[in-house]
Structures are given as structure tokens and as C-alpha cells.
Image (spheres, rainbow, N blue to C red):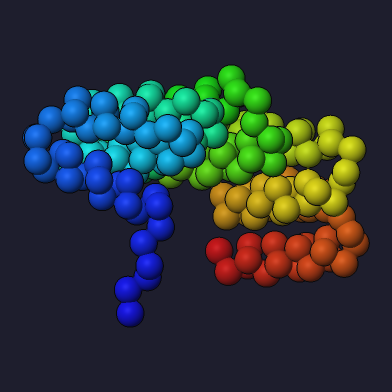
Amino acid sequence: MNQPQTEYDIYKQKALDVLHRTKSVSAVREFIESISDDDYRDHTFLNMAVYLAKQGDFLDAVGFCECIRRPLERADAFTDVAREVKNFKGATLAKDLLKKAIKAVNAGSCDPWEATAVWLGVANDMWLLEERDEAIALVEKSVALCENQSDPIAGSKTLAGCARALTRWGKLQRALEIAQLVEPATLRSLLLEELQRNSKLG
């Protein structure tokens, strides 16, 4: 049974209809810019950027990313397009787009936990692209942000994500150090056991 369409799906389909009817990316951009709701407009740009990237139209895909006004959605778009570019073996462009994602988050007034979610996602992609130092630096940046927050429990999800990433990358000792920051103690204990177990699985 098909899932009911959301408003996001409907706007994406309308944008695709414009593209197929006019064969013009500029016409699609004009249509999306005419959407009055910020959320639907930005997500339609994101969806169409990914669509264009899958077709190999990287120039227009990046242009659509740049049209997104809100920093978090713009970062998500750059990250998603970078992953499509990587599938075409465009490692250099993929790295540049991931750096744009980080720049978008750093320049905006994003919620700290939303920012760390982007950093961790980009860190994983950077690691896969052999940018190991940059990946680790993003993880450490996420840890530092958590340590500077007044609510230690709120940052535990992010800290756990950092520890898991480092364990996957063979950095178990640092992962265990970060896991010690997790609250409450019961969650910390479970995470430590998980990290040790996963490190043995290789």
C-alpha cells in the first residue's frame, strides 16, 4: 500500500512537472522561489538539488543548494548532494561540498545539537573520503560543544555518537574517554560495553 503524499512530496512533484514541461532549470528555480512557506521552499530546493545531482547535473544541484535560505537545511542539502557526487567518483567536489555544509552550520544560529548532528554526519563522509584528520577534528569539535553545555544529559546522545564513530575508525581509547562523559551512569555503562564489544568485532 502506497504511503500518503506529504506536502513536501507534492511540492517536489510540482517542481518535477515544471522541469519536464519546460526543460528549464531556471523555470524550476522560479517556481520554487514562489513558494511562500520557508520550510516547503527550502525542502523543495533540497529535494530538487538531490534529484539533479542523481542525474549528474552537479552545477545546477549546487546552485539549488545555494538558494536555500536557512543554514541547517542548506547544510543538509550540501551533504546530500556530496553523497551523490561521491557516487559518481567526484571525490574532490564531494569534499568541497561537505566543507560548504560545515560553513553553512557555522555561519548560522543553529541549535547546538542540530549543529553536532551535521558535524557528525559530515565527519563520517570525510572519513570515507580519506580526510581522516578533518573527520576526527569534527568529532572533537562536537565533544567540546557538549562539554560546554550546562545540561550533561542533553549532550549524551551526541557524545555516544562521537564515541561510536571513533570506535568504527579504530580509535577505541579516545572513544572510551568520551564515553565516560555520558550521563546517566546506566547509559554510560551500556555504552562502554557496546564500544568494547564492537571493537572486538572489528
What residue sits 26% from the left and 50% below the top?
Answer: 13
What residue sits 60% from the left and 23% below the top?
Answer: 108
Q: Name the image quarter holding the N terminus.
A: bottom left
Q: Residue furthest bottom?
A: 1
Q: Position of residue 99 (x, y in %)?
A: 47, 26
Q: Name the image quarter holding the C terminus.
A: bottom right
What residue sits 37% from the left and 70% below the top?
Answer: 3
Number of numbered discs overlaid on the protein picture: 0
State whether residue 168 appears in this view: yes
- Picture quadrant of residue 94: top left
Q: Residue furthest top?
A: 107
What residue sits 46% from the left and 36% below the top?
Answer: 37
Does residue 160 appear to the left or right of 49 in the view shown? Answer: right
Does residue 152 appear to the left or right of 146 in the view shown? Answer: right
Does residue 1 appear to the left or right of 70 in the view shown? Answer: left
* Residue 14 vertical placement versus 33 (above, below): below
Q: Position of residue 128 (x, y in %)?
A: 43, 44
Q: Position of residue 40 (x, y in %)?
A: 43, 41
* Residue 75 vertical placement versus 87 (above, below): above
State whether residue 56 appears in this view: no
In this view, the residue in front, 117 or 201, is 117
Q: Position of residue 148 (x, y in %)?
A: 84, 32
